[in-house]
Amino acid sequence: MTTGTRPEGRSSLSLAEVGPDRAAEVARVVHRAFGARPRLDPPSTAMDETVTSVAEALRADGGLLVLRQDQPVGALLFDSTVPGRLGLRRVSVDPAHQDHGVASAMVGVAEDVAAARGLDGVWLDARDELAETVTFWLRRGYVVVDRVGPSIRLAKTLELARALPTADDTREFGRRLAAQLVPGDLVVLTGSLGAGKTTLTQGIGAGLGVRGDVTSPTFVISRVHPSLTTGPELVHVDAYRLAGTAELDDLDLDASVADAVTVVEWGEGLAERLGQSWLDVRLDLLEHGGKAALAAAGPDRDVRRPPDLDPGEVRVITVRPRGPRWATSRLRSTLLA
Ligand SMILES: Nc1ncnc2c1ncn2[C@@H]1O[C@H](COP(=O)(O)OP(=O)(O)OP(=O)(O)O)[C@@H](O)[C@H]1O
Ligand SMILES: [Mg+2]
């Protein structure tokens, strides 16, 4: 027991990816965490884990161990049985060390590991009787995607960021994004004036193969571009001049959203309610927030900036998938490939 010590923040935690040599510490945290849980029917198999079984798991896929002042307080095992996604098993926080952000810190590092491994996202199984546990994951953008025995499967596709050196690169990104879009998909674009939202939408329109030039609508707030083939139409909305949700309702997008690909510039805080799922897409100038966006989404291996390029042109795009539509998608790997 750590009585009499000051409450500590996350800064005092150290998190590391560990192998089988740390199996005893990981097994101890797992037993402490699962031993303190309410009895479930059927019971969790976590209490059957031994140092040997944990060592095997760590040898195969690795895991995380969290230390506070050299004392193990959190642990989890990685699972790579689902291609393209990192599984988390035995997510454990020592009950004496809850409310210290141990679990949050572990999830953050696990997501970084998944990103560094080039994976699309993360999944885990949780018992739905444990409402607090489920809420913890839902708050972090995880979505229920399946039921597996006595558990529910939660999954999330990680955000991605990449640098777009020129307007043509932004259009090309839009084309690649369009290849992933199906009727009913909603893209909410955020970024300052001239950030490249319409330029990206031009690429989406080209990728979908729709009629008409995608332009900044001066007088019209919403424009429909029918498909030239059999694909979905593009509904392009510029919400800049919209005063609020009531005016968005007047556009009657509900009527078209199920069959179209809907792209809303300046739609943040407005358009999300058009669907359960959407892509939250941000464009930043590299010099104004773009570097931070890249760093937040992982290694900035995508910054290509030839010396002859105007640094003021470089944009950083960040795509955050929201809702069940994207929770098990290959969006991240296809857009970063
Ligand atoms: N890397 C880049 N990506 C996108 N646009 C770029 C880039 N570099 C330069 N540009 C230029 O920046 C301008 C972006 O204008 P665009 O209309 O796409 O922005 P917007 O975000 O839609 O602006 P608004 O807020 O007015 O709707 C275009 O003139 C484009 O050619
Ligand atoms: Mg625009």
Image: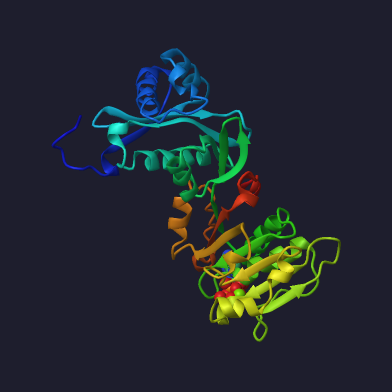
Let me know if residue 65 appears in the view. Answer: no
Residue drawn at point x = 29 percent, y = 43 percent: 10
Q: Is residue 217 above or below residue 37?
A: below
So how many labels did they put on this image? 0
Given the current orientation, which residue lies at the most extreme right position?
A: 229
Residue drawn at point x = 50 percent, y = 21 percent: 57
Residue drawn at point x = 48 percent, y = 41 percent: 111
Q: Quadrant of the N terminus?
A: top left
> What's the coloring here?
rainbow
Given the current orientation, which residue lies at the most extreme top position?
A: 52
Let me know if residue 16 appears in the view. Answer: yes
Residue nearest the observer in this picture, 279 or 306: 279
- Which quadrant of the view contains residue 97? top left
- Residue 155: percent from left, percent from top: 57, 42
Q: Is residue 333 above or below residue 322?
A: above
Does 218 sit left or right of 280 as displayed? right
Does 184 sit left or right of 4 as displayed? right
Q: Is residue 199 above or below residue 250?
A: above
